[in-house]
Image (cartoon, grey):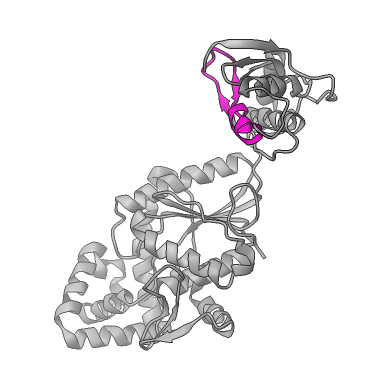
Amino acid sequence: MGDETSTSASGSAQEPAAPAMQGAGSVKQQISNLAALSLRATVPEVDVEPIVEVCTGKFGDYQCNNAMGLWSKVKGSGTSFKNPNAIGQAIAKNLPACDVIESASVAGPGFVNIVLSKSWVAKRIQDMLVNGIKTWAPILPVKRVVLDFSSPNIAKEMHVGHLRSTIIGDTLARMFEFSNVEVLRRNHVGDWGTQFGMLIEFLFEKFPNWEELGSQAIGDLQVFYKASKQRFDEDAEFKDRAQQAVVRLQGGEEKYRAAWKKICEISRNEFDQVYKLLDVQLEEKGESFYNPYIPQVLEKLSSQGLIEESEGARVLFIQGHQIPLIVVKRDGGFNYASTDLAALWYRLNVEKAEWIIYVTDVGQQQHFDMFFKGCQDGWLASRSKGKEVPKNESCWVWPCSWSRWQALPNS
């Protein structure tokens, strides 16, 4: 960052002494809070967030890198500052006097290098040894998070995408929990849909006494699934019976519900072996859990004029997308989008989530782009205020209350 050009003791005569700030979040957060006070005192006419990074150790422990950015905003406006270094000097001088910072120096074009007080660090370590590691936990602007991860499909193998989602999701959950955030770990398993008609009908056909045989009737669930899928694709009469089985399952007929529960139980036991091996805790709330909420959610959308008829299906037209988001299929059945809408409604209104995080495969990017955009443009339009939903290749964040980087406020 260049040679140090000036050195300034922390604190300023213009600022009252600040307390040690123990238990006020991570060390970086506390330094950022002090830097924010200094920035407001240095350039009060500019609203800027502190840019604080960890140093390599050569110049200090932490570094505030706001000077150059501030200079680009104030130069030519009659400011008294001559260059970025002068702004850096002022930032260092205006750091509140406290027992956190031992000294602050300025290097190059205004990089403010901050050295922590050794006695303060010793006290923090002592506090940690007495009260636990969570005394170092960062403070987040959220109290309750719904974290949707893993989410394999019943009767199918967990593939690498599910494992990746499981590991990333569990890591995020542990980080939030370390920061004293209540995390609702949700396993949105695929336990509902047309494939179960195929599986159930194949079970009835091959093993009329399946209830006596139990899990032995199905054996290897992956082999059983492939055999039933082959029969479904090749036999039109079987396909018709499988489709009727779906109707009966969704209608609540006990025989079909019992077979469905058995298939889910076998698959769930296999998933649990993986979760136990990875030491991952999850609460299952699959597609079937949200199914009863779909009609009322879609009715609310329809009453707002957001759902339209298109080629026999009911859809949401999404701005910027040529293809609409189908929420009710031509045959009147529900799909992933309708289930996701109901899940979002439940998480916002029943579980009272402040943030909702989906950890999914990048292959679902178009679905989530359309789903989030549809919600923002439609039933949550009054809350979105044009914010983008932050995401990366495997994680979509749906925050529901305002902070620096959040997207949607809860109701």
Give how far across and how far down residue 309 sits, in percent: 43, 87
Q: Is residue 275 above or below residue 190?
A: above
Write the residue at 63% across / 64% down: 383
Residue 7: quarter of image:
top right
Magenta segment: does it hold 56? yes
Q: Is residue 255 visible?
A: no
Give how far across and how far down residue 406 sits, in percent: 59, 52
- Quarter of the picture containing the C terminus is bottom right
Write the residue at 39% across / 73% down: 192
Write the residue at 20% across / 68% down: 226
Report the number of numbered marks.
0
Q: Is residue 272 above or below residue 320?
A: above
Give how far across and how far down residue 14 sits, in percent: 84, 23
Q: Is residue 319 visible?
A: yes
Q: Residue furthest left?
A: 234
Residue 331: quarter of image:
bottom left
- Span shown in magenta: 52-75
Give how far across and how far down residue 332 sits, in percent: 40, 86
For residue 126, side relative to residue 220 (left or right)? right
For residue 260, side relative to residue 111 (left or right)? left
Q: Is residue 204 above or below residue 33?
A: below
Write the residue at 30% across / 85% down: 243
For residue 285, side relative to residue 52 (left or right)? left
Magenta segment: does it hold 54? yes
- Along the line of sight, the residue nearer the viewer: 57 or 354: 57
- Along the line of sight, the residue nearer the viewer: 138 or 6: 6
